[in-house]
């Protein structure tokens, strides 16, 4: 641990009151969520929150879990590490039951030493929206439970499928922080298994908007003649790169990860296409960590859609924001909610943070209604399935045949 982190954590010891253990649970169980609810990535936090709250409202309206209702306190961090750190300190001070559904790698990574510092107070982070490695590996992995597949899972699948159809010259566009570097490393590792290397790369600064000009990065990526680009970015940056690539006449496939929020990215590309008289939505691929929310053959999808249609809850601090009816992000949030309720159900009449590890790790072969069971009995990641989508009829739908991408 660096001297700076040691100083910060020692300072925290004096700033926070001494804990005397979690109080006996009341009729309300409170969880703390730090995420971006404003700024370039504000939609991620809002829709993630709306997804699990649609389920919690349904559960609460039907008597809660063993008579206890669930409440989540959302705190805005703007996708910035320092505010996330302060939000987490406040949650610990307020003695929340657990930290829940944080959004983003740079923010989540920044609070991991706090979990280690307060190990004796049973502070756990449940189901963050990030596929990064630091909270999946020692020394911090013991404090975090992940529902979603990892970025290594997503990048390996993208590389394997692209290579299988002859697209072996892969470039990488990534956010220059912990999120982007994790994804970059995932692509590098996957290519090495095939005896290949990244042919070109370009990075950008976190927080860039869709209006940012990425034409220089687009040219840099294309200098080595790649036949596919994998992006580890946000919806704004990935969408802007796609726009600028197409404006340069480049038509190679561009693939992104689940964190890119493909629904919002596609909306931005449709709007730009109408404005510029171009189609920016062809040859796009996005990995997802949940099935397509249009697949109503799945009982989990049907319940999710029903609950979202009836949910009238919070839509952030922006009065101009129009919530999405359905999205991959809110569907992931909904699944988080289902697993959290199952954990609390298994705790019975004695729900305490200290019991989180034993109870979550008892969840095995749990049916979410999506065709893939949750299993925490073998580790701290409940799902490892990755789904691949492309734009069909104006929305991202499942890829059923990769041969269409053959070079």
Image (cartoon, rainbow, N blue to C red):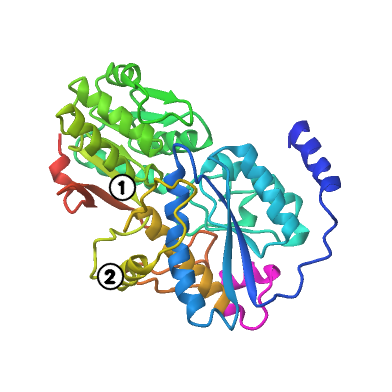
Q: Secondary structure at mark 2?
A: loop
Q: Within the magenta stretch, is there residue 357?
A: yes
For the question of whether residue 383 can be seen, the reply is no
For the question of whether residue 288 can be seen, the reply is yes
Q: Estimate the x, y position of residue 307 in percent, counting from the top left.
A: 37, 70
Q: Estimate the x, y position of residue 3 in percent, counting from the top left.
A: 78, 32
The tag on residue 153 is none
Residue sitting at x 75%, y 75%: 24
User: Which residue, given by chain and number where applicable, does mark 2 sit on?
Assistant: 298
Q: Nearer the viewer, residue 76 or 405?
A: 76
Question: Which span is picked out in magenta?
Answer: 346-362
Residue sitting at x 52%, y 73%: 341
In the displayed structure, does residue 187 sit left or right of residue 92? left
Q: Nearer the viewer, residue 182 or 312?
A: 312
Q: Within the magenta stretch, is there residue 207?
A: no
The C terminus - image quarter: top left
Q: How many marks?
A: 2
User: Which residue, given by chain and number where applicable, does mark 1 sit on?
Assistant: 263
As drawn, 50 above or below 114: below
Q: Estimate the x, y position of residue 112 in percent, counting from the top left.
A: 65, 47
Residue sitting at x 55%, y 39%: 106
The N terminus - image quarter: top right
Residue neighbourhood size for the residue with mark 2, other residues' Cα within 10 Å, grouped as few (<14), some (14–19), many (≥20): some
As drawn, 13 above or below 245: below
Q: Secondary structure at mark 1?
A: helix
Q: Nearer the viewer, residue 364 or 293?
A: 293
């Amino acid at each position: 641990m660096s001297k700076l982190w040691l100083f910060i954590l020692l300072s925290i010891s004096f700033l926070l009151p001494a804990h005397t253990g979690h109080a006996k649970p009341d009729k309300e169980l409170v969880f703390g969520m730090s995420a971006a609810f404003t700024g370039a990535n504000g939609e991620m936090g809002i829709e993630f929150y709306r997804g699990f709250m649609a389920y919690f409202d349904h559960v609460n309206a039907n008597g809660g879990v063993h008579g206890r209702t669930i409440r989540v306190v959302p705190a805005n961090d703007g996708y910035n590490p320092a505010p996330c750190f302060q939000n987490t300190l406040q949650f610990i001070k307020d003695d929340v039951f657990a930290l829940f559904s944080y959004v983003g790698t740079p923010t989540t990574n920044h609070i991991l030493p706090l979990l280690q510092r307060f190990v004796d107070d049973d502070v756990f982070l449940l189901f963050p929206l990030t596929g990064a490695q630091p909270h999946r590996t020692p020394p911090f992995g013991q404090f975090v439970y992940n529902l979603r597949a990892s970025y290594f899972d997503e990048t390996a699948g993208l590389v394997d499928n692209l290579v299988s159809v002859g697209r072996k010259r892969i470039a990488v566009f990534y956010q220059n922080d912990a999120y982007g570097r994790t994804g970059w490393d995932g692509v590098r590792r996957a290519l090495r298994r095939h005896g290949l290397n990244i042919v070109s790369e370009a990075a950008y600064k976190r927080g860039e908007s869709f209006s940012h000009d990425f034409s220089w990065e687009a040219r840099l990526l294309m200098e080595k003649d790649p036949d596919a680009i994998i992006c580890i970015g946000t919806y704004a940056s990935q969408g802007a790169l796609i726009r600028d690539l197409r404006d340069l006449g480049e038509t190679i496939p561009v693939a992104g990860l689940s964190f890119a929020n493909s629904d919002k990215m596609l909306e931005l590309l449709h709007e730009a296409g109408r404005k510029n008289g171009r189609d920016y939505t062809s040859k796009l691929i996005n990995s997802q960590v949940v099935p397509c929310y249009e697949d109503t053959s799945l009982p989990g999808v049907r319940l999710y859609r029903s609950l979202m249609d009836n949910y009238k809850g919070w839509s952030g601090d922006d009065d101009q924001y129009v919530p999405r009816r359905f999205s991959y992000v809110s569907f992931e949030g909904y699944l988080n909610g289902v697993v959290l309720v199952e954990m609390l159900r298994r705790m019975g009449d004695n729900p305490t943070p200290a019991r989180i590890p034993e109870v979550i790790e008892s969840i095995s072969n749990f049916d979410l209604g999506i065709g893939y069971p949750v299993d925490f009995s073998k580790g701290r990641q409940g799902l490892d399935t990755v789904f691949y989508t492309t734009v069909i009829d104006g929305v991202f739908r499942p890829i059923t045949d990769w041969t269409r991408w053959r070079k």
